[in-house]
Image: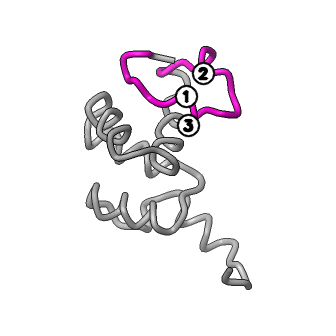
Amino acid sequence: MDIALGLSKSLFWDVDPKTIDIEKHTLFIIERVLTRGTWDEFKKIMNHFGKKPLGEYACQIRYLDKKTLSFCASYFNIPKEKFKCYTQQQLHPTYWVY
């Protein structure tokens, strides 16, 4: 993992952080920070990738919880319908709200 980003190892509890390559695993890193990271970690990836590219990467993520999706749509000023996680969610509606 690129130590310059200074992301917490706890974000990547299920993988060896030494094997993560920022160029190869960009979407994985962004997904983890958006769903489990702190505001400071969010700012770190924002500084590294930039706002527009980060919004484009966020649109490619297959799953974001509703709160994170709403935050991303609002923060990046992108309609929810542009997010892959939103369109896939609509294809598979759930019957239980829990």
17 lies left or right of 31: right
- Residue occupying the point 65% across, 33% down: 13
**Number of marks in the image?**
3
Q: Residue at coordinates 59% horizontally, 56% vertically from top-left?
A: 63
Q: Residue at x 52, y 48 (%)?
A: 36
Q: Position of residue 49 (x, y in %)?
A: 32, 31
Instruction: Classify 30 as above or below 83.
Output: above
How far apart are the alpha carbons under marks 1 and 3? 5 Å
Residue situated furthest right in the rendering: 95
Amino acid residing under circle 3: Leu
**Residue holding disc 3:** 11
Evaluate if marks 2 and 1 touch, with contact meaning CB atoms under 8 Å apart.
yes
- The numbered disc on residue 32 is none
Asked if residue 17 is among those painted magenta in the image, a careful observer would answer: yes
Quarter holding the C terminus is: bottom right
Residue carrying label 2: 17
Q: CA distance from mark 3 to mark 2?
A: 9 Å
Q: Position of residue 55 (x, y in %)?
A: 35, 47
Dividing the picture into quadrants, the one containing residue 70 is bottom left
Q: Nearer the viewer, residue 6 or 96?
A: 6
Q: Residues within 10 Å of mark 2 (few under 14, many from 20)?
A: some
The magenta segment is 3-23
Q: Residues within 10 Å of mark 1 (few under 14, many from 20)?
A: few
Reading the image, the residue beneath label 1 is: 9
Q: From the viewer's perspective, is residue 48 above or below residue 4?
A: below
- Vertical comparison of 94 with 34: above or below: below
